[in-house]
Amino acid sequence: MNMKLIMKKRLNRSWAVDLLLFLLLGSVAFFMAIPLIFTISNAFKPIDEIFVFPPRMLVRHPTLKNFTDLVNIFSDSWVPFSRYVFNTFFIAITGTVGHVIIASAAAYPLAKIRFPGRNFLFSIVVMSLMFTAYVTQVPNYMTISWLNLINTYWAILLPSFGMTLGLYLMKQFMEQIPDALLEAAKIDGASEYRIFWTIVMPIVKPAWLTLIIFSLQSLWTNGSVTSHKYIYSEQLKTVDYVFGQVASGGLVRTGPVAAVTLLMMAVPITVFIVTQSNIIQTMSTSGLKE
Amino acid sequence: MKQTVMNLNPIGPPETGRHGRVAALRALPARIGRVFREMKKNKHAYALIAPYFLIFGTFTVFPVLMSLALSFTSFNMLEPPKWVGWHNYARLFVQDDIFLIALKNTLLFALITGPISYMACFLFAWLINELPPKLRALLTLILYAPSISGNTYLIWQTLFASDSYGYANSFLMKWGVIMEPIQWLQDPRFMLGILILVQLWLSLGTSFLAFIAGLQNVDRTLYEAGAIDGVRNRWQELWFITLPAMRPQLLFGAVIQITLAFSVAEISIYMIGFPSVDYAAHTIVTHLVDYGSIRFEMGYASAIATVLFTMMLCTNLLTRKLLGKVGE
């Protein structure tokens, strides 16, 4: 009987409120989707449909011309396009892996070990979330140049390892792990490192998958801003920088720009789709229960 | 047994008065020793946090401290900083009319988008959580996509274009609501409203995802126990079971949404232009960009950042208090 109750999971529900809430959800989802549908359909519009009056939301005669034009534009550049792709993937993957490991390692003691200075360190982290990046740009540039990191991958990678968001998220999740579980492991003779790596990390899998999404996304979309500031050599620039160059090409490039917008959007969304199915599957098996 | 208890607390309950202070001073070496022993015992903890805090210190704490210090100076990046005391702050509130407009816009913006986006993040995460997995994945994607996909918000520029090619204009003209196109993005009457709309469109981001992950961690047996204990409807279930179980994520979301709501700038700069007509969409951060990256008055820019930081900090403390009452 009890088991059935849990499986049903619809303990206190009335269908009228259900209907109302899901109507609300549906209309919001529709509103959210309009600009996305528009972006996708635009990328496949032939040039005469982009400028048609009155404007139409959906594409009538889809074409791939915008994408082939885009390829032609890239074939003119003197750094091969594959180099930009490599840079992008290298920065996104290295930055994300480093961030997830370093931030999780720091989050575990902050959440579960009592040591002097713990509260102080965490309150600094929280406060730094509230300081806008615009004004720390100049001191940051100075630091990076003092460390001789200008024009290297490290100028982007190192700061991304220490992003605040990841540590904060991981700590909040690790706090929910029951102490009893960790104490049991300690009694069995596991060291703190072992507990962190073989017990805590598997439990908080939804959290670090979420973190991977955030990190990849920020490295992908902010890449052009950062690489602009710290990286001068064309060899080290990333894909979104090149795409940005296309986007500033004006009216003649309206078609390729629509294609670029779609490509820029496609990458983080693909990563999200892949990661999300994992997050959802992890749910009830996460062992967070006492 | 008694011995260990004594060791753990050698100072005893805090005493007041001169006598107490002297005693506390005498106990100081013991206290330092105790802290030191504690630190030694926890050397693994320090080893684990060391890499992060080294990087964090270099690229976050140090720049922030430097910027706080610079806010009391006049600094143009060419000459060394000159100490000016509170001058920057005085100038900000007394002489700078545009800052006051920016302050008003930012507060208005934060008051509207902050609470709405925070509640929307939770509400939608919660509703989605009850759906069958496939539908849930699809809806999560639709709701989350705007905030993840970089600068897709520029699409709104096309939707609100000021000629009759703009979708909003052509739609309204077709239905006879307006006779001639409205300059949505140049008209001070509409700018802030459109910014708020776009920001809300973008706002189901980080916190939304954290809430979804958090909801999946709530122990399901709690609901069953709640039903037995007399929880009668979904609202009671939400208030007494779900929300308290999610307090860590709720705090995380609050900090993120508050920071977002106060630091709007990018979408204003790219969509409306910089500076906006009559400064109607000017915010504290665009003011900061103006002085920091265009006029290179770094001292003044740092003072603006510090004011913004103080506002966020106060809002956060208030929110923290309110969240403490959840489930009571």
Image: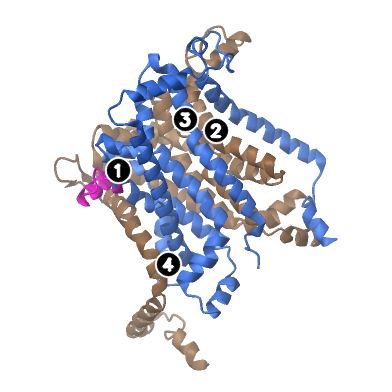
Chain colours: A blue, B brown
Which disc is residue B201 wearing?
2
Residue at 26% over, 47% down: A139
Q: Which residue has dot 3 on it? A: A263
Instruction: Determine the residue located farthest toward the left in the rendered image.
Output: B79
- Which is more toward the observer, B34 or B192? B34
Kindly identify which residue carries mark 4: A118
Label 3 vs 1, first from the N-terminus? 1
Q: Position of residue A33 (x, y in %)?
A: 60, 29
Q: How many marks?
A: 4
Q: Distance of mark 3 from mark 1, alpha carbons?
A: 29 Å
Which mark is nearer the camera, 4 or 3? Answer: 3
Q: Are the residues flagged by discs 3 and 1 in contact, CB closer than 8 Å?
A: no
Q: Picture quarter containing residue B38?
A: bottom left
Q: Are marks 1 and 4 on the same chain?
A: yes
- Pointer 3: residues within 10 angstroms few (<14), some, or many (20+)? some
Residue A81 visible in the shown view: yes
- Residue type marked 1: Gln
Q: Which mark is residue A268?
A: none
Q: Give left or right: position of B148 versus B89.
A: right
Going from the N terminus, do you reach mark 4 or mark 3 first? 4
- What crowding class fits label 1: few (fewer than 14 Cα within 10 Å), some (14-19), or many (20 or more)? some
> From which residue to which does the magenta span run?
A137-154
The answer to whether mark 2 and mark 1 are in CB contact below 8 A is no
Determine whether the residue tagged by mark 2 lies in a helix, strand or loop: helix
Q: CA distance from mark 2 to mark 4?
A: 37 Å
User: Does mark 4 fall on the same chain as mark 2?
Assistant: no
Residue labelled with disc 1: A137
Q: Which of the two discs, 1 and 4, labels the residue nearer the N terminus?
A: 4
Instruction: Find residue A179 and report its horizontal and vertical position in percent.
Output: 57, 71
Amino acid type at circle 4 is Arg
